[in-house]
Image (cartoon, rainbow, N blue to C red):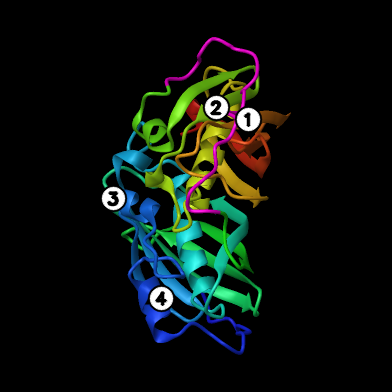
Amino acid sequence: MGSPQTNLPSATPDDAELAGLRRGLGREGIPIPAYQTLGVEVRSATIGAAVVRVPVSPHLAAPGGGLLPGAFAVLADACCGCAVAAALPAGGAALTVQLRVEFIRPLPPGHAWIEGRAEADAVDDDSGLARAEIVDEADQLLGVSSLRIIKASHQGSRHGAAATPVSPGRSQPARHQADNPVARFLGVVSRLADSGRSTWTFRPSHAVANSFGMVHGGVLGLLAHEVASDALRSVIGLGEELIPLDLVVNFYRGVPAADGLAAAIARVAHRGRRFVVAEGEVAGPDGRPALRLSAGAQIRGTHAR
């Protein structure tokens, strides 16, 4: 990526806060549990730029090896978020409002990590936009991403209030196992998919939280792509496979971690001969919508490989 002419705010983080970002801490110097769980490593952080690595781990592993495409969302949020946070004025929370990932190629088995190299395109006193390239160990481009952030005084409470669990709707026969590494990481309780619709319930733990006790935005991006992929897979036939194209997540509010059941739903909005799209939403434990999601994929015959 080139060096953008970034518009920086008049006041930027002090040396202590910038040093905290380099150690993978939140803007107030608070540890980020999701980073610790996944081994996220901030390789560098300067005002308006960041390099972050996410290692291959069982939490993010694809069934055939490599990484789940949704793992790119974790990296995109981490590196782009760090680039913007390092340029925002000190104090307050940096809240993700939109996350976008475009997939170029999957990470093949045998690699140890993926790396995001992010630069802030524009940052003012209240918001910022950053873009990143996602590469593998051989410096091969795997995807590109962008992240929009707004600044707020805080992001919810670190101690969530009791809430009423969300009902996922009518009970259906399970079509997918909830007991696999990524499902355990996300706290999935039930995972159902049929006829272009998927419905999940999950109980996120503190291990997937950000520094404010809410589910990390990148982890919600991973969840969004997984629930959308279940819906997409339910409408393809024998001899067909899906090639991920993009993921867009618009965030409304946070999802408290360790605070009861939440729900995620995706539906196939378009199924053409070569292209399929799923749209959906995630609701928090109180039933209020937390984000909207859209994921697209190419349909390809397995004989085309």
Where is residue 85? Give x, y as percent. 51, 72
**Disc nearer the start of the sequence (2/3):** 3
In the image, taking residue 102 as reference, residue 133 lies left or right, namely left
CA gap, disc 3 to disc 1? 32 Å
Against 91, residue 158 (above or below) is above
Query: Which residue occupies the foreground of this view, 91 or 118?
Result: 91
**Where is mark 2, residue-wise?**
200
CA gap, disc 2 to disc 3? 30 Å
**Disc nearer the start of the sequence (3/1):** 3
**Disc nearer the start of the sequence (4/1):** 4
Q: Which disc, if any, is residue 45?
A: 4
Q: Which SS class for mark 4? A: strand
**Where is mark 3, residue-wise?**
111
Q: Amino acid at mark 2?
A: Trp
Against 159, residue 288 (above or below) is above
Q: Amino acid at mark 1?
A: Ile
Magenta includes 176? yes
Q: Which disc, if any, is residue 265?
A: 1
Query: Which residue occupies the foreground of this view, 35 or 138?
Result: 35
In which quarter of the view is residue 60 placed? top left
Q: Is residue 273 visible?
A: no
**Residue at the image point whose x is 47% and y is 19% from the top:** 176
The residue carrying pointer 2 sits among few (fewer than 14), some (14 to 19) or many (20 or more) residues within 10 Å by Cα, namely many
Q: Amino acid at mark 4?
A: Ala
Q: Which SS class for mark 1? A: strand
Q: Are marks 2 and 3 in contact (CB under 8 Å)?
A: no
CA gap, disc 4 to disc 2? 36 Å
